Image (spheres, rainbow, N blue to C red):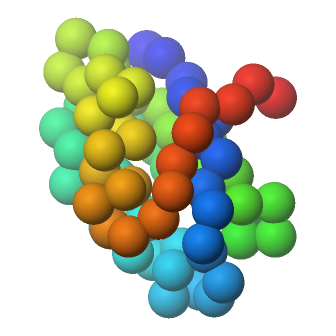
Amino acid sequence: MQNAHIQIDGMTCTGCTASVQKALQAQTGVSSISISLEDGVASVGYDEALVNQQQLLDAIEAAGFDATLTSL
């Protein structure tokens, strides 16, 4: 199990966080999601055998947001 910390630009409301959460939940292998609207960061637990970090970023970007990996 891996953890990715993703900076998300463009989230302005709880509807935005719900969209990001939905996009990430649709990815096979994602086991946990924690999103901070205030910080603009998502922490995602995932199985690297089923999904990779680029797929997570792509899912967020497909939902209409800019996403980059970050370290905490």
Q: Position of residue 55 (x, y in %)?
A: 28, 34
Classify the position of the N terminus by image quarter.
top left
> Looking at the image, which is closer to me, 31 or 42?
42
Q: Position of residue 67 (x, y in %)?
A: 52, 48
User: How many numbered dots are placed on residues in this image?
Assistant: 0
Q: Is residue 47 left or right of residue 69?
A: left
Residue found 57% across the figure and 39% down from its top: 68
Classify the position of the C terminus by image quarter.
top right
> Looking at the image, which is closer to me, 66 or 40?
66
Q: Position of residue 2 (x, y in %)?
A: 48, 17
Q: Is residue 38 left or right of residue 69?
A: right
Residue found 19% across the figure and 21% down from its top: 50
Q: Position of residue 17 (x, y in %)?
A: 53, 73
Q: Is residue 21 above or below residue 19?
A: above
Residue found 61% across the figure and 75% down from its top: 11
Q: Is residue 12 visible?
A: yes
Q: Is residue 23 visible?
A: no
Q: Is residue 59 above or below residue 51?
A: below
Residue found 39% across the figure and 26% down from its top: 53
